[in-house]
Amino acid sequence: MKESWEYLIKPIKSLSLLKKLKFLKYIIFIIFLAFLLSIGIAYFIYLLLEGLIWSFFDLSQIHSMIKFLVYAVIVLQSFFLFLVFYRVFVQIFVFPFLLLLRKELEKHYRIGNFQKTNFFLSFRNFLWSLYKTLLFQVVYLFLLVFTFFLGPLQPLILFLYQGYSLGYGIYDILLEQEFPTPKERYQLIESIKKEVFFTGVGALILIFIPILGVILSPVSGFIAAFQNRYQRYLILV
């Protein structure tokens, strides 16, 4: 239990390390793009769901309390749908930059460089990771539908599942230079599921930080995963 808790809070603790790394300069544009897309996608999903509800029910004729509950459900479901687009966005536009963060972490902790992959292998790994992410999101959409009537359990189930999805993606990119083939990384990730799960959930919690949370979430999760993976090598400076 203590180990699980440490995995969970490590992404939050890792925020203090960011100011020591020369990394944020690489992703200023990505932060700006993520912020604009997050607002745009979230608002679009909200309008879409609201339109669907209005097409079946005339909310103007409903009691104000019930209307409030309906809109609360719309906002909640909008957030969970937003996580689908967010996760794909992170996989395509943020995760490739995490290899630069890895270099900064290796310098910071004075860890020697691990095996490097060539462009072809890196591109193949990118496509494989994107494929896995899309599979995760397909399952997530099924869960979104089938857990709707579970009431307060739905948010918990969906958040934990998406946390594991994020953790899997983080460890997949982290291990790429040590284990170039997807099969090797899959086998290792399967053997450390608890670490992957709690690190991913801890990272996803940071998405609630206004504006910067959409980027800090995967970045802090990557730092935490790096520390977990190479803890025996770390030399604090």
Image (tube, rainbow, N blue to C red):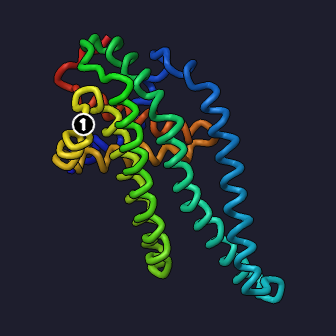
Residue at image position (23%, 50%) is: 194
Quick one: label 1, few (<14), some, or many (20+) residues within 10 Å? some
Q: Quick check: 75 above or below 118?
A: below
> In the visual, does 197 lie left or right of 87?
left
Dot 1 amino acid type: Thr
Q: Quick check: 108 above or below 54?
A: above
> In the visual, does 55 lie left or right of 112?
right
* Coordinates of residue 182 in the picture (x, y in percent): 26, 41
In depth, the one of 156 and 88 nearer the eye is: 88
In depth, the one of 66 and 87 nearer the eye is: 87
Residue at image position (67%, 33%) is: 32
**Quadrant showing the C terminus:** top left
Count every numbered label the image shows and give the total. Answer: 1
Residue at image position (45%, 15%) is: 20
Residue at image position (23%, 45%) is: 186
Residue bearing the label numbered 1 = 181
- The reply to whether residue 2 is visible in this rendering is no
* Coordinates of residue 203 in the picture (x, y in percent): 42, 43
Q: Quick check: 122 above or below 5?
A: above
In depth, the one of 44 and 10 nearer the eye is: 44
* Coordinates of residue 47 in the picture (x, y in percent): 74, 65
> In the visual, does 25 lie left or right of 146?
right
Q: Residue furthest front?
A: 120
Q: Which secondary structure, mark 1?
A: loop
* Coordinates of residue 159 in the picture (x, y in percent): 44, 59
In depth, the one of 132 and 57 nearer the eye is: 132
